[in-house]
Image: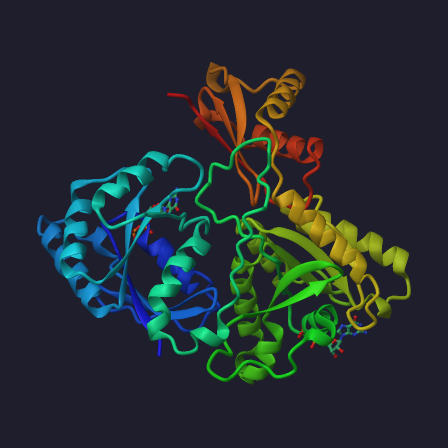
Amino acid sequence: MSFTLAIVGRPNVGKSTLFNRLVGRRLALVDDQPGVTRDLREGDARLMDLRFTVIDTAGLEDVTDDSLQGRMRRLTERAVDMADISLFLVDGRAGLTATDRVFADILRRKGGKVILAVNKAEGSAADAGALEAWELGLGEPVRISAEHGEGMEDLYHLLRPLAAEYDEREAETAPAVEVDLSEAEGEEEADPLAHRPTAAKPLQIAVIGRPNAGKSTLINKILGTDRLLTGPEAGITRDAISLRSDWMGTPIRIWDTAGMRKKARVVEKLEKLSVADGLRAVRFAEVVVVLLDVEIPFETQDLRIADFAETEGRAVVVAANKWDLEDEKQEKLADLKEMFERLLPQLKGAPLVTVSAKTGRGLDRLHDAIVRVHDIWNKRITTAKLNSWLGAMTEAHPPPAPGGHRIKLRYMTQVKTRPPGFVVMCSHPDLMPDSYKRYLVNGLREHFEMPGTPIRLTFRSQG
Ligand code: GDP
Ligand code: GDP
């Protein structure tokens, strides 16, 4: 038995975005397209080990007549009635509106289980909105970013106890949740995403790649004798599962998709599913190992997966497997490096390691590369250091003056980690050319030694 979650809220708060994230529907490869009813959309969702049905009330934006309010209300009531738990979404950047309050009234009146989430809370633009949301009288709001996948763990921790009574499997499959309060935050600056639990979690790794790249072999090798030989029971074959281990002294949780696929025996869809499942695992991972078969490296599928990992903001290590089969190792390595640079410029500087999952050679290098990119992914740079660097950068190359408008860079600060995100306050942010942004991102990567992680840089005007 599972439960049903209704995502409700006024238009434009990000319901569809969250729906898509939970269902993974924008990954066109997933073959269980939710049935699109006229007004309510339904899909099979998962969040960590929770599996549930999600319904949302998207599509209302299309209705422009003045019965909108009434329809919205009816639809929301219907969704709430159908669901076991409601997830009420508000827009943390826009602040509360009268419509939000109407919805809050409906939800309070219905008296069901409600989680209040403040969306668009990446960065600090939703700080005020998150405070304001308390006024709705629906308890503590959880801050999330449906678009960037932030806050999903917090959401999970709220959802899980509410869902417990609906999910019999929950007790068996739930991961241990450890919270280590002794974990020292970076002393340099406070974390603006303070809502994130400071859990001393195992390092989360997903190994993804085309079928036969050697994912199962590699995961087995990493897990060693700890590995459970029996697979997960039928019914969850389509999902990624995770296995915990201690790998060369590093606690890890590794997302296994390959083994599951083998159990699934969905022969005709083997290829498609393995990729789709791999992409799902990316969302749970901190570090994504893109495993290539060195005999057929950088295939279209590999590139897609690597690109997805980057856009999802994950740290990436590229591992070329089956290195034992290679005779001309030097030449091959040069080839690989050249292809990597040419085909995946967005992952500039990410480590490329050669391994043999079969013999175990190179696994120490892989381990070290994973730990290193994970550190970088979590890296925090002081505002003072950033600004002295920014000064040097603008001196070397002043920003352009498009159309006679001088772009003045005022100061810069790191607003987030995992992956590192920076904001540069400047005049005319909308005029900033991509070339100058690239100059700064590449400079940041080089100067502060941040290979293997996506870097987010945004420009904002003051006031
Ligand atoms: P819905 O009408 O409630 O289904 O909202 P949508 O999912 O269509 O999102 C409305 C707009 O908000 C879109 O432009 C999204 O890209 C944007 N959006 C959704 N989630 C986020 C988020 O977490 N952060 C930001 N900044 N924008 C978001
Ligand atoms: P998956 O589909 O990505 O999980 O790939 P598997 O782990 O099932 O491996 C596919 C095939 O490649 C199997 O026959 C493995 O024995 C073989 N294989 C995996 N890793 C290596 C390796 O490092 N060297 C060699 N020579 N073969 C490998």
Q: In screen coordinates, is 225 left or right of 97?
A: right
Q: Where's the N terminus, which quadrant?
A: bottom left
Please tell me in which quadrant of the rendered image residue 168 appears.
bottom left
Q: Is residue 213 visible?
A: no
Res 393 quadrant in image: top right
- Image point (46%, 41%), residue name: 194
| Quarter-of-image position of residue 120 | top left
Q: Is residue 258 above or below residue 443?
A: below
Task: Residue at 57% x, 20% y: name it.
Answer: 399
Q: Position of residue 261 (x, y in %)?
A: 57, 78
Foreground residue among 352 and 388: 388
Quadrant containing the C terminus is top left
Q: Residue 334 at what x, y percent from top left? A: 84, 52
Residue at screen point 66% across, 45% down: 375
Q: Furthest-front residue in view?
A: 182
Q: Which of 48/431 is in front?
A: 48
Number of numbered tags placed on the structure image:
0
Q: Is residue 316 above or below residue 237?
A: above
* Residue 11 coordinates in the image, percent (x, y): 24, 49
Q: Position of residue 157 (x, y in %)?
A: 42, 58
**Can the viewer see residue 280?**
yes
Q: Quadrant of ligand 2?
A: bottom right
Q: Residue at x 33, y 74 (%)?
A: 166
Visual colour scheme: rainbow
